[in-house]
Image (tube, coloured by chain):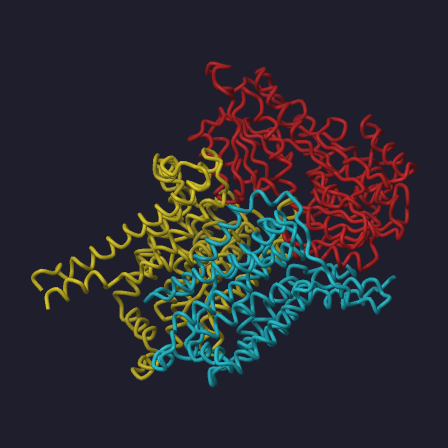
Amino acid sequence: MSKGIPHALNKVVEPFLIIVGSLSISMMLFGAFVAAAGANPFEVYQTMYRAAFGTSFSWQNTLIRAAPLMLTALCTALPGYLGLIIIGGEGAVVMGGLFAAIVALTMPNAPPMVVLTTMALAGMAAGAIWLAIGGALRHYRAVNETISSLLLNYIAIALLNHLVTSTFRDSESLNHPSTHHIGEANMIGLIPGTDLHWGLVFGIVACVLSWFLMHHTVFGFASQIAGGNVRAAQIAGLPVGRLILIVCCVAGAAGGLAGMVEVAAIHGRANDTLNANYGYAGILVAFVARNNPLAIIPVAVLLGGIRASSGLLQRAHELPDATVLVMQGIIFLVILFSETLYGRFSRMPKQGAV
Amino acid sequence: MSTSNKLTRRQLLTGTAAAGALGLWGGLPWPDRAWGADKVKMGFIFVGPRDDYGYNQAHFEGKSAVAKLDWVKAFDEEKVPETIEVQKTMESMVKLDGAQVLFPTSFGYFDPHILKVAPQFPNIQFLHCGGLYQEGKHPQNVGSYFGYIDESQYVAGIVAGGMSKSGKLGFVAAKPIPQVLRNINNYTLGARSIKPNTTVNVIFTGDWSLPVREAEATNSLVDQGIDVITCHVDSPKVVITTAEKRGIYCTGYHCNQSKLAPKGYLTGAEWNWAKVYMDYAELIRNRQPIPHLVRGGLKQGLVKVSEYHQIVPGAVRNQAEAAKAKFMSGSMVVYKGPIKDNTGRVVIAAGKEHVQTDIWLESMDWLVEGVVGSTKS
Amino acid sequence: MDVGWWGVLIAVLGGAIRIGTPFLFVSLGECLTEKSGRINLGLEGTLVMGAMTGYAVSLHSGSPWLGVLCAGLAGMTLGALHSWLCSFKRVNDIAVGIAMMLFGTGLAFFLGKPYIQPSAPRLPSIDLGAWSDIPQLQAALQINALFLIGIVVAVVLAWMLKHTAWGLKVRVVGESADAARALGLPVHRIRILSTAQGGFLAGIGGSYLSLYYPFNWSEGLSSGQGLMAVALVIFARWHPIGCLWVSLLWGGAAALGPSLQSVGITGGYYIFNAIPYIMTLAVMIITCSPKRTLVGVPHDLTVSR
């Protein structure tokens, strides 16, 4: 053992090496791709860095795009502990935003803090219920949760569109059918000293709390057991059904909160812009973060940065908008592939020590 | 919505429209950098792909026209959603590229996004496509422009009505919002001005770009016996090619699509954004005041009518040209009472008229008599 | 001829074939892939890539059928990439699928820019409705050879899976990779081949969209047909003939919304247009049960655990 790297250090060094290695490889692949398309890869990277992290504006641009992804990533990551693959974040965002706006409109005279708190609770409840449908169907009817959550996304979007163009439509929202405005006084402000709204704080806090819940509580431990082996969990007397429902509710609440933030911090109304694909982007963030809520934060920032750089890339290099899609595809393929490398580095020194 | 409410709003809007047309920039906030040495930097923002054979392409063609001027540096960004992303794009164009004029071209960019970003940059001009600017209510460095493309739709409606044998026309539309309803109504009124029994069947697809559903809507309409079709979706390509395949006539929208349907493309309603952007560029170069509201139709050259297909007979052409001439001279009033909606309610009483610039028309939520369809979703 | 309410029936019949054909190809592709024990959620990217490739090749070569072939080959490449990546330890096929979806659509949009404007030659259609003198029915029965090919593929695939050695191998690998290894079967190679063939079919499904119906290459062309393949396969109980019926059902359901509007049922079109999704969910809820396993399910599949 003396020649090997100490195990604890290895646990840190190995992921670090693997992630740095996969990022470098994907940057080489993407560099080759843009070079083939006729752009200078070094200039492209310089532009991307400038647009995503180069100035304080760029940082804020990146963080503001990362904020909803942290919340929607939890929609996939938390059920992942139970072995469920849920891709229904989009539906949770849409339902959360819709119901947050609706409850705000029922309380025109309440003080802003009350309105915002109620909105947050309503949005979280709506998202929780929507995502839990998938979990419940899985547990009680053995309906595949991946597919049901995907279908529920489409149904949620149809419901949103139907309701904001009929029952809840503000007749003054002429060319963009929306609900009534929740009122300027009820909008969430900015984090002092920045151009960032509070959604970022919600995202980080939600990720940290989720990590604590899943890794440092009995509930989280039970969920991990149930996720590892349902039969063992049942023999141990764990209430698997209840675990599934609670975890899905917590996950959906995060998505619903993202929808509420969209309404309360940006649009002031619920309309079709709630369907902005944050839910789908969150799936990828969760997978790349290997469902670890703490890892979600940096991965979301990375994705936010890539997305923030799209604009300048188009303007400075006349590359099409799809360039960053290709880049996301390459980076995530390489990172997902790198999963296979875990354990190889730690095994080598051990073998050497034998 | 109560009637009194509507009246107040109408009065308010008409008042501000008049003020807006006259309202010019006060002290011009142009940056005092050495003029001529530096190019004027213009940023264009599109909600969809630049080359969609439709809405965004029409704007991109306008942008390409100004970009050719040697004293302009124009850049653009495509597929920017109407979320916080467009706010960041605007800020980024100003902060990282030094844009002095921004043209966010999608309707949904205005409220809340432009309204939130513009006050932070009082020296930058935000010129929005949609005609939503209201004097006193919106920031001073915001302006808006829009074309009365419904005038072209009226002319296209005459051609469609004149060429239809069944007296049934079709309209594939995205959403029942005022801009779209106005096009449908003008198309119908145009057709009925020469053949009063013409009907127009409308199908709302629910969103701006849904190729399969647009094709399906076209097929359903053809099955119901319509023989001329048009549309108001982001990209008319699918509707036009499907109509050609089914062997019926069509009229285009946004751009000229005659290449897509050499047999059946009768005419079409087209934007001419190059004219708007060139005019703005000229004002900026001469450091002249920029009006808050720029609006216009055929007369001002903001919209066009595609060249008629050779199969359109002289008689129909003459009727279309006569209407066009009235638009060009400014004497045409499309919304002249009595006009009933398709539920039989009188919307515009006899003797009353709403001229093209009347803001009341921009809150249209009804379909004119002769349209088969409903604004309810 | 005035068909009135019959128009809805005609539209649903025609729509079943017109809209259903791409669903048929992607679901057959996904069915084969899943039979081998893999799930490919990236078929959306494959479909879009196929649509772009088909359109581009048809434009350059003047032959739409060559376009279809190349679309299939492009899809095959993406499918092979997916399954090659997944053949490494601990690489999750669903996650890779979602990344492939981004990669495929991104690549197609990136490379497809020059092809949005030009008009490529269209695939020809076959008149199966010539016997009828109702023009609407004639139009509804004007179909593309790809639909017939799709039926043949479904039948052949069903037969091969059941009656050939190759089919047996695929099914064994899908049932249990360990058992297959014990029998000495090359698990990875079989899965890579099945996923690549699945990608081939999905690519063809894409070329149907761009070269026949709605006949257009644009970035908004697909509205999730590839993503839905996964749902259709479960709906079809992993049976190729089932895929045929389910695709037709989906096509018909998707045609219902617009055709109802054309006869004057104007309200609630957002809900009508969501019918296919609601219907699929309802069927899954009714037919699934925790007390028994689904018939036909490959047990080594991530989604069937």
In the figure, the yellow chain has which letter? A
**Residue B371 visible in the displayed image:** no
Residue at the extreme right: B315
> Can you give x and y, in whole percent of width and height, for residue B113 in the image?
52, 39
- Above or below B87: residue B286: above
- Above or below B50: residue C41: below
Front-lying residue, A35 or B41: A35
In the figure, the red chain has which letter? B
Residue at 52% from the left image edge and 68% from the top image edge: C30
> Can you give x and y, in whole percent of width and height, for residue B105 in the image?
59, 36
Q: Is residue A233 left or right of residue A64?
A: left
Front-lying residue, B119 or B159: B159
Residue at 59% from the left image edge and 51% from the top image edge: C57
Q: Is residue A103 left or right of residue B14?
A: left
> Can you give x and y, in whole percent of width and height, for residue B232 in the image?
70, 46
Residue at 81% from the left image edge and 30% from the top image edge: B327
> Can you give x and y, in whole percent of width and height, for residue B243 in the image?
76, 52
Q: Quadrant of residue C270?
A: bottom right
- Above or below C150: residue B31: above
In the figure, the cyan chain has which letter? C
